[in-house]
Amino acid sequence: MNDNSPETSQKPERVFKSGGVFASVFKREGAKGTFRVANLHRRYQDKQGQWQSSYQFTRSELAKVIDVAQQAEAYIKEKEAVEQPAEVKERQAA
């Protein structure tokens, strides 16, 4: 990817794919604990055969965007349900 987002320097925790549309989930640490973010993009080859990323989607790709976004949301919710209680207990013990 040719952007300067923080996600490019870290490997995603999980990637969901539908056709050329991807949702990459990244784990982050913040002041309030662990959280996750999702990056939605599509991959394509340009006229020179180089792989590129785009964050714009055509009408026909929107169903794929919805699909991978829902998968990412379910994954993040599942992780939060498992991890959040442990983080709350750790904070209470401190």
Image (tube, rainbow, N blue to C red):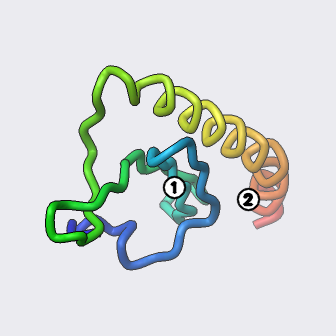
The residue that mark 2 highlights is 91
Q: Position of residue 47 (x, y in %)?
A: 15, 62
Residue at the spot 84% in from the left edge and 50% down from the top edge: 82
Q: Position of residue 16 (x, y in %)?
A: 60, 50
Name which of mark 2 and mark 1 comes first in the sequence: 1
Spatial CA span between label 2 and label 1: 29 Å
Q: What type is the residue that disc 1 sits on?
A: Ser
Callout count: 2
Q: Position of residue 85 (x, y in %)?
A: 83, 48
Residue at the spot 36% in from the left edge and 55% down from the top edge: 43
CB under 8 Å between callouts 2 and 1? no
**Mark 1 residue element:** strand
Q: Give the crowd class for mark 1: few <14, some 14-19, many >=20 residues within 10 Å.
A: many
Find the residue positioned furthest to the left: 47
Q: Is residue 69 above or below residue 22?
A: above
Pick the front one: 28 or 67 = 67
Pick the front one: 88 or 80 = 80
Pick the front one: 6 or 45 = 45
Q: What type is the residue that disc 2 sits on?
A: Arg
Q: Give the crowd class for mark 2: few <14, some 14-19, many >=20 residues within 10 Å.
A: few
In the visual, does 57 lie left or right of 88? left
**Mark 2 residue element:** helix
Q: Is residue 38 above or below residue 69?
A: below
The residue that mark 1 highlights is 24
Which quadrant would the N terminus be assigned to in this image? bottom left
Q: Position of residue 19 (x, y in %)?
A: 52, 44
Image quarter of residue 57: top left
Image quarter of residue 72: top right
Q: Is residue 50 above or below residue 42?
A: below
Which quadrant would the C terminus be assigned to in this image? bottom right
- Nearest-to-viewer mark from 2 and 1: 1
In the drawing, what numbered circle is on residue 51?
none
